[in-house]
Image (spheres, grey):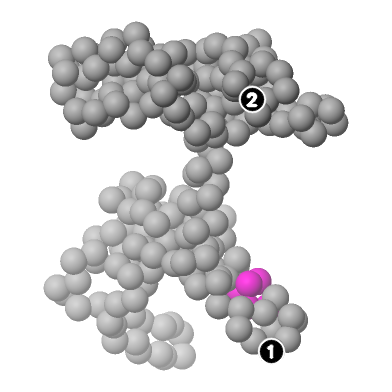
């Protein structure tokens, strides 16, 4: 943080909670608990305050706290940032900016785990680079399929692994003729409707 401030670089970091920080938002946690118990749903409050550690920080900094009550228990979270209140208010800073980082990590994990982009065991750097390139292209294609072809189905928010296993990794009878390639799926396929809808959506998207 000191380096970022000296270089004029804004930052937004997660901050490990402790008893002092939790005590700072005790009233917000109590309000969230009352609302959660009344509605039966998770509830959250946000608090924006200036904070400094007892020893490790060189100065006070802006901290945003999420006071959440969910599943019958408290779930406080804290972030520290150089962004001002005018640039981003507390809820927007946490939910739209900070949480977006976690969503980006999820997309990287999709490519790495669902599409096996972590398999870079070839002898040469060029071969491993080619493997990563193919994995990246596969992710682009599956993301487009999810965004365009599956937007009106139960798989609109599905991971690449789910789409691969339930829509692509299926048994079918392929018949090739001079004019066409025919793919015949079994009548018992549980996702035949989604498969057909995806095909219709993709076909309509092509100019």
| Secondary element at tag 2 | loop
Residue lying at 46% horizontally and 19% vertically, measured from the top left = 20
Task: Return the residue nearer the eye: 180 or 45.
Answer: 45
The magenta stretch spans residue 156 = no
Question: In the picture provided, is 111 more to the left or to the right than 151?
Answer: right
Quarter of the rendering occupied by the N terminus? top right
Please count the marks in the image: 2
Residue lying at 69% horizontally and 89% vertically, measured from the top left = 123
Please say whether residue 144 is visible from this viewpoint. Answer: no
Identify whether 23 is placed above or below 56: above
Span colored in magenta:
130-134
- Asked if the residue at tag 1 contacts the one at tag 2, i.e. Cβ–Cβ closer than 8 Å, the answer is no
Residue 202 percent coordinates (x, y): 45, 58
Q: Report crowding for label 1: few under 14, some 14 to 19, many 20 or more residues within 10 A (C-alpha).
A: few
Q: Which residue is mark 1?
A: 123
First of labels 2, 1 by sequence position: 2
Residue lying at 48% horizontally and 51% vertically, measured from the top left = 106
Q: Which residue is mark 2?
A: 55
């Amino acid at each position: 943080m000191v380096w970022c401030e000296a270089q004029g670089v804004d930052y937004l970091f997660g901050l490990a909670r402790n008893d002092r920080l939790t005590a700072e938002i005790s009233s917000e946690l109590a309000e969230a608990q009352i609302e959660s118990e009344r509605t039966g749903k998770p509830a959250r409050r946000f608090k924006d305050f200036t904070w400094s550690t007892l020893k490790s920080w060189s100065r006070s900094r802006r901290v945003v706290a999420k006071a959440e009550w969910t599943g019958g228990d408290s779930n406080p979270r804290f972030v520290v940032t150089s962004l001002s209140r005018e640039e981003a208010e507390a809820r927007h800073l946490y939910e739209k900016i900070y949480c977006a980082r976690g969503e980006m990590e999820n997309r990287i994990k999709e490519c790495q785990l669902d599409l096996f982009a972590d398999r870079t065991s070839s002898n040469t750097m060029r071969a491993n680079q080619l493997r990563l390139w193919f994995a990246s292209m596969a992710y682009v294609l599956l993301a487009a399929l999810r965004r365009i072809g599956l937007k009106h189905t139960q798989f609109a928010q599905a991971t690449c692994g789910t789409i691969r296993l339930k829509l692509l990794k299926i048994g079918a009878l392929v018949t090739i003729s001079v004019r066409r390639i025919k793919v015949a799926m079994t009548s018992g396929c549980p996702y035949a409707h989604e498969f057909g809808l995806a095909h219709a959506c993709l076909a309509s998207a092509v100019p």
